[in-house]
Image (cartoon, helix red, strand yellow):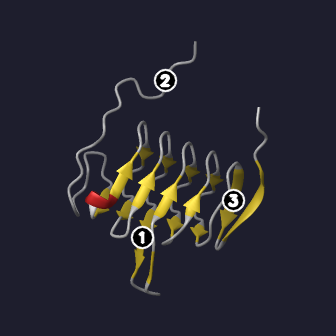
Amino acid sequence: MAQKRFKNWKKPKIKHGELTKWNWMVQHPENLKLGQETDIGAFTYINAKHGVTIGNNVEIGSHCSIYSLSTIDHKKGRVILKRNCRIGSHSTIMPGVTIGTNSVVGAHSFVNSNISDNVIAVGCPVKVLRKIKQH
């Protein structure tokens, strides 16, 4: 029998602009929908002003930035990370982006467009490399 990754996973206490006990931060946590058994790396920043949804079993590497609002180009929009997707360390997710179920975004990627289900995508800006084979 396979072991579960998280034996006693509990939703963390999140306060606006303060580090969680795992050293990641959310602005506007009232607009964050956090799924079960998520793993968010240290020093990741989430701006949820216009909504961020993180699905069940999502993994986000350290030092990532997830923006529902960009003050540089004045874009805004809900970010959706669907179930079981993986975001590599030091990646940036821009407003209005959806990353599909089971998809993998490579480290140091700049994601400014939607990523479909079951693909591997990398780069700056991000580009799909290939589909992930389903078992």
For label 1, the residue is 68
Q: Is residue 31 above or below residue 132?
A: below
Q: Residue at x 39, y 23 (%)?
A: 7
The amino acid marked with disc number 3 is: Ala
Residue 21 shown left or right of residue 60 in the figure: left
Helix, strand or loop at label 2? It is loop
Q: Position of residue 4 (x, y in %)?
A: 49, 23
Q: Is there CB contact under 8 Å for labels 3 and 1?
A: no
Instruction: Name the element at disc 1.
Output: loop
Q: Label for residue 14?
A: none
Left or right relative to 56: residue 44: left
Quarter that holds the N terminus: top right
Q: Earlier in the sequence, mark 3 or mark 1?
A: 1
Q: Nearer the viewer, residue 7 or 28?
A: 28
Mark 2 or 3 closer to N-term?
2
Q: Residue at x 40, y 75 (%)?
A: 69
> Which residue is disc 3 drawn over?
121
Q: In which image quadrant can residue 11 be found?
A: top left
Question: Which one is in front in this view, the residue at disc 1 or the one at disc 2?
Answer: 1
Q: Secondary structure at mark 3?
A: strand
Q: Amino acid at mark 1?
A: Ser
Cα separation, mark 1 vs mark 2, equals 31 Å
C-alpha separation, residue under disc 2 versus residue under disc 3: 27 Å
For this orientation, the residue located farthest to the top is 1
Q: Residue at x 76, y 37 (%)?
A: 134
Q: Which mark is residue 4?
A: 2
Q: Residue at x 51, y 67 (%)?
A: 92
